[in-house]
Image (cartoon, grey):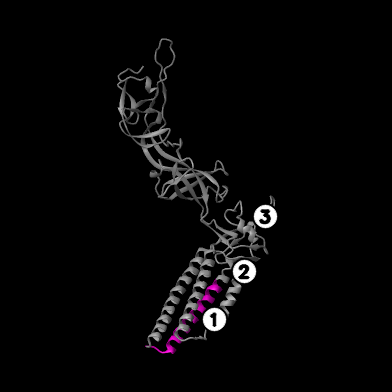
Amino acid sequence: MSRRSPLVIIAAGALLLLPLTAASCDDEPSAVRLGTAAVGDVEEIVEAPGTVTARTAATLTAPAAGTLTELRVESGDRVDKGGLLAVIDSPELEQRRDLAERSLDESDVVTVSSGTSGFAAVRHRTDEQAADAFEHAAAAADKIADPELKKALKHQITAARQQYAAASEAAGEAVRSVQRGVASLSRAVGALSAAQRLQAEQAYALADAAVEALSLRAPVGGTVQFGGVSQPSTPDLSTILEGGGSGVTQPAGVDSAVPEGAHVTAGTPILTVVDTSELGLSAAVDETDVLLVEPGVRAEAELDAAPGVVYPATVRSADLLPTTSARGGVSYTVRLSVGAAGDDAPRPLPGMSAVIRLKVREAGDAVTVPASAVISVDGRDTVWAVRRDRYESVPVTLGVQGDETVQVVRGISAGERIVVAGADQVTAGDEVP
């Protein structure tokens, strides 16, 4: 949960604190202290916990069960988008492609028996084969991690469905025309042949695309690390029974990365490509402060891993929907760009914890008073001023507010003497000693 930081910068005009003593029966010094309203710059700071973020990270997973036959990179290698990183051998997908290829070779011949009922049977069988091909292709596409490759394959499946649906409907209409006696058998044979040929071509194309997806290519440019973004702590029973590499719990001291030659199940994370070309920050800003945060607001970040080093940052956006913590507090994610802190400063790594100070409001050459000088009287912000050598309660309008210093927009002028401590001991009209 964020909180207002006590960090307030006053660029001009120091506050002069004047001790005041008053006579008392025991001659003890009074707790009342005076100061002077000054002119300076004030920054209102919202402090929030945050995390360093990479531009993007993409985890490549096995599209199907098989063997990791080639691993062409090492952890830490820099790769370009589209580069071949690993190859998986999946006999199941390759067998499906071989069957589709044989069906394609045999799709030119349509054998029909039992009159028009035979035509209907051929069409029904072709429809079932098409549905089976589409189902397996969709299942293979769902296991592809590369979003662009997945999107392309799903688009290919959708287009194939639409094309086949049109061909199947044309074949059905031809069969119905034969049954009504208004079309020749040759027309029905031709329509069925076209539907079968299209189905076989699509089945082979989709099976071939699934096999091609076994060659894992970098979806983005970046740095390689083995495994996924986060490793599962407890494998599920089905994964263990399948004998998948991700289902084996490695003992301490053993690399958890999937080695070349290991068996993998569909969905096993092989490696992740992290793009750190542009680092950012993600801050959790409390609901009481988020309305002050706008794009362009300047900020500073200090990493737990690099204490004392200040990284400049700028707000890019703030999420509209909140996140609720286990304690019930509500916060909003604010995203920032982060800059370099200097040539000698360490480069942050994604996931590092940070404290982010957002400069949500600023006032320059403003009339400022210590925050301790402002009290509430009948629900109004008030400052005790010294006027004509007597205490006077003055309602004020505040502007930018820091925890130590605040801006006074109306009510007090620069140079006026004010009570900065001990206001509870002051009575209006009393003479200032």
Return the disc, 1 or 3, that comes first in the chain's sequence: 1
- Residue 199 rendering spot, x and y as whole percentages: 49, 78
Of residues 408 and 68, the one drawn nearer to the viewer in this rendering = 68
Check disc 3 and report the residue beneath it: 255
Q: What segment is highlighted magenta in the picture?
A: 182-209
Residue at 43 percent of width and 81 percent of height: 171
Q: Residues within 10 Å of mark 3 (few under 14, many from 20)?
A: few
Q: CA distance from mark 3 to mark 2?
A: 24 Å
Label 2 amino acid?
Ser
Check disc 2 and report the residue beneath it: 90
- Residue 300 rendering spot, x and y as whole percentages: 48, 44
Check disc 1 and report the residue beneath it: 104
Say which quarter of the image contains residue 267.
bottom right
Secondary element under disc 2, as helix, strand or loop, is loop
Residue at 43 percent of width and 86 percent of height: 188
Secondary element under disc 1, as helix, strand or loop, is helix
